Amino acid sequence: MSAGQLKAAITPARLLDENGRLVRGASKPDAEALLEGYRKLVFARRLNEQCGALVRQGRLAVYPSSRGQEACQVACASVLSDGDWLFPTYRDTAAIAARGVDPVEVLTLLRGDWHCGYDPNEHKVAPQATPLATQLLHAVGVAHAARLKGEDTVVMALCGDGATSEGDFHEACNFAAVFNAPVVFFVQNNKYAISVPLARQSVAPSLAAKAIGYGMPGFRVDGNDLPVLEKVLGEAVARARAGEGPTLVEADTYRIESHTNADDATRYREDDEVAEWLPRDPLLRVRTYLTSVGALDDEHEREITAAAEEMAAAVRSGVGAETVVDPEEIFAHVYSTPTPQLAEQRAALRAELDAEEA
């Protein structure tokens, strides 16, 4: 491990500073591509806002907001090709939507349904995972299988800082490195594992530095800087596709809202801490830069905002639609060939339903 590699794992890379100015010596981002990225950022923010409202209205059972982390959500989806896989957590609704999945379908699980709402094989997006770090093992398995089959598939495996404290994180990283699996581990370090601050989870100089122990490259980036996220994640995907193995990327970001609507963040962090991160808003940063280079004007802003509002209206309509429930569906996917016991239970349920309708 060279001094340069160690620095990359500890010092956050950045292209745009907190005021939306290009960092000295940094190459200019492609304005057209960044404008499309900004559109996705606005959509992600509007989706977070809309879902928060739906929870308050009782139309969603729970919603883990990614407000403040939208640059991470957009970047991890944007750098993947159609045949690549995304393995999300429960907080990555906006990332799945950025991947092209209908937001209404993404929210099916969070409404309390029994399935994830979309076809994982069609979209190359695994179901959202609530247990910490379990999806990382599945992601490595898919990546390893792709390598064995000679495919050029790359897998993007998402997790938060809390997941790095789980044994599954270690096992996934170690297996991926040993077998040179084409996977990118993307840690969105938002500083809290529910109520546990990062300082109570790890005293490593950074979470990206953990990559050193597994023998893979590790990079720490400013998680609110969309251009640098796309650059670093894109390079990691390219290395994986070229057969150079896994990479661990840590995004230095912040969870602006509570863990979920069931959490009271004021019990474990001060409002002043949250206020310090508000000016680092990824949307504000990109908007300021695009405006300064003449790529974004009021007309563009209005068009993007109007499109985001259309998306939010479609989400309200879709989530608010009455769901037709078939009670017998609970027996449909237990075994490929139903057992006699299941058939008996299904018949008993059918009899009860018929008696109620009589």
Image (spheres, rainbow, N blue to C red):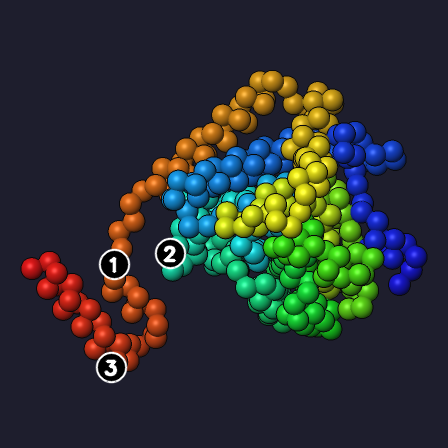
* Relative image position of residue 123 (x, y in whole percent): 49, 53
* Quadrant of residue 32 within the rendered picture: top right
Q: Is residue 188 visible?
A: no
Q: Is residue 314 visible?
A: yes
Is 314 above or below relative to 194? above
**Relative to 20, is 150 on the left or the right?**
left
Q: CA distance from mark 1 to mark 2?
A: 12 Å
Residue at label 1?
326
Residue at label 2?
113
Crowd class of label 3 (few under 14; some 14 to 19; many from 20; radius 10 Å): few
Quarter occupied by the C terminus: bottom left
Amino acid at dot 3? Pro
How many numbered callouts?
3
* Quadrant of residue 257 within the rendered picture: top right
**Relative to 6, is 283 on the left or the right?**
left
Q: Earlier in the sequence, mark 3 or mark 1?
A: 1
User: Looking at the image, do the residues carrying marks 1 and 2 touch, with CB atoms under 8 Å apart?
Assistant: no
Residue at label 3?
340
User: Looking at the image, do the residues carrying marks 2 and 3 touch, with CB atoms under 8 Å apart?
Assistant: no
Amino acid at dot 1? Asp
Q: Residue at x 26, y 51 (%)?
A: 324
Amino acid at dot 2? Asp
**Relative to 48, is 358 on the left or the right?**
left
Is 319 above or below relative to 201? above
Q: Earlier in the sequence, mark 1 or mark 2?
A: 2
Q: Of the residues tagged 2 and 3, which is closer to the observer?
A: 2
User: Looking at the image, do the residues carrying marks 3 and 1 touch, with CB atoms under 8 Å apart?
Assistant: no
